[in-house]
Image: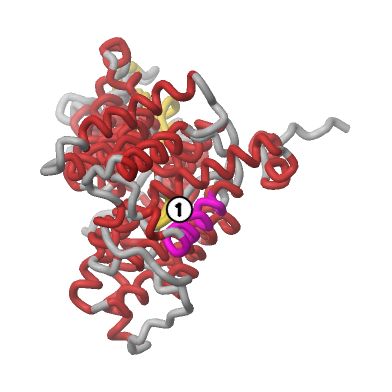
């Protein structure tokens, strides 16, 4: 008996470092711990900013980032990925907070998490295979631009000392890895610039200026809203939007981490893990969130983390920093964190995709999809809208390209009894984009009394094609001519037999 071929996805997962490996290896443990610390520091200003977008107290965003990171480290399907409060989710739920208040916002988060679990069980993660590479490249490039754009606000109308500090931070992150690769360069830059501003008493914007930090642990919270249909009508649209945006960003980020680490992950597991983490976050009064590609890149690409331990420690360190060492964290200059995020944006951008050599070799349709994804995402500041638009453009261009591959050849064949017949040989895939033009490819007036349509080299994919064939047959019948359709493969014959004659009213 022949042995079964190994499952590549399981094989790659088996080779992936685990928390057990990290705990047994001092080197790996140090990498995971330092990565978690750097991510925690980078999460603080981001969580505060997203809280402001959502219209909630900054402590709500910080608490959400802690609970999301810790929960997803256990529940997620993609190790080393960072989930926390995000701008995309904040934008979606902000109207609820503005119009109905905090309790309705938390109810929205809880329902959004529940919907994510339902969508995961329903298999929504499998739709990821319909996202083409050009959309993924556009997603990554747009995200890099948005990360960089978010830092510009911290470099406008600020003391002049901010600019050399940002430049110094970038220089440290570029040069330090050549001297020492054990300690993450972003951590060195943050510590060095913080120490410099404190010792020299330089007055520059710092983390404390962004908003108040929590002084206690998150506590259990139940939203005080009526549990009735009226409440459901209010929060359901926002919860559904939050669920879709969160799953989309999380699965795209998971796919990106898969590529960086050369390992596989369960997207269905990740999808329901995000939902469960959002529900846990909601029950602790957090604003919800999803995967954060910027912080994930810091964790995976910059710091070299590979296990769930780094994600867990990022959440734990975040809580320790803001609750136990809030006064110290408040002194971190924003210039240091800006430098870190600028380097993240530079490292995230796919520079190869915009080289002239690449653009010349790449089909115009692929470049169009990539550029469209970037432009729409940057203009809307919404990754979900950009990705969906990119997919729709890709589908449209693909349908247009495939439609033009369909050809119809006409031949007049003399029969043995002296009569003649027109034989039309159709090659290519017949679906709505190509079959709509099929109707115009026939010489209705000039053809003999008997017409044969040979579909041996074709395939019927949808009802639009059957309707087109019915329209062709009807037009010939009005001229007193008969039509015979031959060469249908089994699926095409079944679809044609089931639908023909029933698609139009008489």
Does residue 476 appear in this view?
no
Q: Nearer the viewer, residue 62 or 243?
A: 62
Residue 337 lies in magenta, yes or no? no
Tally the marks: 1
Residue bounds of the magenta highlight? 311-324
- Image quarter hosting the N terminus: top right
Q: Nearer the viewer, residue 442 or 421?
A: 442
**Coordinates of residue 128 in the picture (x, y in percent):** 45, 44
Q: Label 1: which residue?
A: 83
Q: Is residue 122 left or right of residue 349?
A: right
Q: At x 73% / y 34%, what residue is drawn?
A: 6
The picture quadrant where one finds residue 151 is top left
Q: Nearer the viewer, residue 348 or 186?
A: 186
The colour scheme is: secondary structure
**Coordinates of residue 324 in the picture (x, y in percent):** 47, 62
Q: At x 51% / y 65%, what residue is drawn?
A: 276
**Coordinates of residue 259 in the picture (x, y in percent):** 51, 32
The picture quadrant where one finds residue 59 is bottom left
Q: Main secondary structure of the magenta part?
A: helix
**Coordinates of residue 296 in the picture (x, y in percent):** 45, 42
Residue 313 lies in magenta, yes or no? yes
Residue neighbourhood size for the residue with mark 1, other residues' Cα within 10 Å, grouped as few (<14), some (14–19), many (≥20): many
The furthest residue to the right: 1
Q: Is residue 295 above or below residue 114?
A: above
Label 1: element kind? strand
Q: Is residue 216 above or below residue 378?
A: below
Q: Is residue 113 left or right of residue 239?
A: right
- Image quarter hosting the C terminus: bottom left
The furthest residue to the left: 157
């Amino acid at each position: 008996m022949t042995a079964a071929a190994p499952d590549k996805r399981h094989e790659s997962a088996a080779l992936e470092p685990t928390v057990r490996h990290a705990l047994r290896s001092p080197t790996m443990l140090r990498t995971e711990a330092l990565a978690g610390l750097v991510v925690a520091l980078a999460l603080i200003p981001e969580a505060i900013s997203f809280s402001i977008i959502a219209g909630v107290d900054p402590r709500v965003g910080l608490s959400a980032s802690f609970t999301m990171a810790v929960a997803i480290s256990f529940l997620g399907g993609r190790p080393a990925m960072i989930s926390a409060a995000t701008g995309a989710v904040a934008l979606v739920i902000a109207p609820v907070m503005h119009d109905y208040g905090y309790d309705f916002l938390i109810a929205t988060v809880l329902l959004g998490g529940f919907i994510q679990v339902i969508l995961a069980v329903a298999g929504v993660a499998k739709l990821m295979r319909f996202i083409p590479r050009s959309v993924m490249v556009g997603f990554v490039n747009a995200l890099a631009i948005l990360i960089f754009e978010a830092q510009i606000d911290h470099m406008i109308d600020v003391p002049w000392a901010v600019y050399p500090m940002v430049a110094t931070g970038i220089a440290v992150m570029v040069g330090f890895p050549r001297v020492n690769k054990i300690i993450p360069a972003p951590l060195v830059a943050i510590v060095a610039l913080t120490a410099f501003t404190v010792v020299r008493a330089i007055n520059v914007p710092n983390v404390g200026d962004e908003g108040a930090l929590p002084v206690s642990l998150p506590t259990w919270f139940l939203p005080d809203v009526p549990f009735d249909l009226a409440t459901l009508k209010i929060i359901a649209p926002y919860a559904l939007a939050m669920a879709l945006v969160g799953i989309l960003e999380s699965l795209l980020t998971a796919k990106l981490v898969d590529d960086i680490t050369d390992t596989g992950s369960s997207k269905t597991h990740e999808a329901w893990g995000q939902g469960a983490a959002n529900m846990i976050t909601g029950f602790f009064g957090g604003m919800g969130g999803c995967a954060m590609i910027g912080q994930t890149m810091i964790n995976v690409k910059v710091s070299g983390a590979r296990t769930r331990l780094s994600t867990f420690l990022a959440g734990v360190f975040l809580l320790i920093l803001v609750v136990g060492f809030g006064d110290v964290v408040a002194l971190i200059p924003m210039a240091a964190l800006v430098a870190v995020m600028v380097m993240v944006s530079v490292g995230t951008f796919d520079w190869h995709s915009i080289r002239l050599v690449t653009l010349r070799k790449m089909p115009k349709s692929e470049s169009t999809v990539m550029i469209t994804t970037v432009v729409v995402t940057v203009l809307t500041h919404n990754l979900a809208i950009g990705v969906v638009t990119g997919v729709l453009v890709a589908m449209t261009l693909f349908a247009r390209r495939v439609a033009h591959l369909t050809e119809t050849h006409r031949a007049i064949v003399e029969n043995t009894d002296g009569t003649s017949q027109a034989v039309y040989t159709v090659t290519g895939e017949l679906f709505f984009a190509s079959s709509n033009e099929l109707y115009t490819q026939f010489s209705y007036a000039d053809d003999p009394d008997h017409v044969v349509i040979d579909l041996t080299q074709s395939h019927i994919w949808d009802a639009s094609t059957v309707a087109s064939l019915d329209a062709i047959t009807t037009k010939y019948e009005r001229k007193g001519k008969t039509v015979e359709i031959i060469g249908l493969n089994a699926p095409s014959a079944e679809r044609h037999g089931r639908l023909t004659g029933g698609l139009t009213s008489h």
